[in-house]
Image (spheres, grey):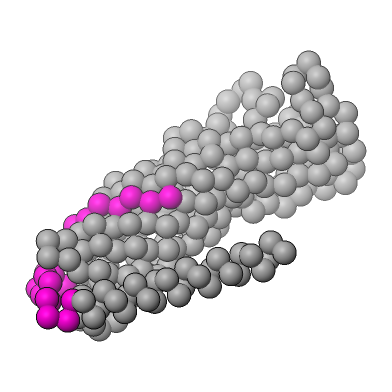
Amino acid sequence: MQHLLRNKIIYSIIVLIALSTKAFSQSSEFDYNLEDHDDKKFHFGINLGANRSFYKFTNHPRFLQYDSVLGVESIQSTGVNLAWLVNMRLGKHFDLRTYPLNLIFTEKAFEYTIKYPDRFLFEDSLTTRKVQGITLALPLQLKFSSDRIDNFKVYLIGGGRIEYDFAANAGERNAEKLIKLNKLDYGIEAGIGFHFYFPVFVLSPEVKVNWGFRNVHSRDPNLKFSNVIDQIRSRSITLSFIIE
């Protein structure tokens, strides 16, 4: 049932975007905005977005050897992005983009099913451990754009990025209730966006996904919330609105 509902929502969003695009293009037929915007060598923008993130993880062999933790799941959570865009034109259809200042705020979580919860540590049979993140990311993206249709254009992006999490806690000694994570991560990202040209600015809704490659787990065999997990890699999907 949830699967069908999710498909209906996705289909409705696609139809809404298509109808909005058609209406926007028709209403702008005689009002060609910012004609020389895409011909500039450099242009800048502000990016404000929301992300949905989680961890992809694998269980450690210890998970099967002991029965104190019966199950582990990664819970998706919502965060925000704030970034400054720098775009360099390479040609008619290609651009190189980066975000020199790109802050990402997240709160991922793991949910544990515990056989013998410790009531003195406020544990339940179903216990959640949150992992907050304040990340500075440096992406480098190649952008491919379609031809401009009136005041509308579609583009695709792909590239890689490096991340540094200021809130990561791999070096902490007293972390009995936490999962230790390393600060440095790297991965790739890809997405699709739409340019809407207005008289004084360009608005660009954009959706992209990110796959982290590095194992960010700093496993501690002495911590029961950490020793049952082997490798942890980040995953996220982001909806952004860029104003140029």
* Residue drawn 30% across the image and 53% down it: 47
Residue 32 belongs to the span the image colors magenta: yes
Residue 145 position within the rendered picture, expressed as x and y whole percent measured from the top left: 29, 77
- Judged left or right of residue 7, residue 85 is left
Closer-to-camera residue (21/63):
21
- Judged left or right of residue 188, residue 146 is left
Q: Is residue 21 visible?
A: yes
Residue 107 position within the rendered picture, expressed as x and y whole percent measured from the top left: 54, 39
* Residue drawn 53% across the image and 35% down it: 132
Closer-to-camera residue (2/236):
2
Which quadrant: the C terminus? Answer: bottom left
* Residue drawn 51% across the image and 46% down it: 78
Q: Is residue 215 visible?
A: no
113 to 52, vertically: above or below: above
What range is drawn magenta here?
A: 28-50
Closer-to-camera residue (119/198):
198
Q: How many marks?
A: 0
Residue 185 position within the rendered picture, expressed as x and y whole percent measured from the top left: 49, 49
* Residue drawn 21% across the image and 64% down it: 202
Which quadrant: the N terminus? Answer: bottom right
Residue 92 position within the rendered picture, expressed as x and y whole percent measured from the top left: 20, 81
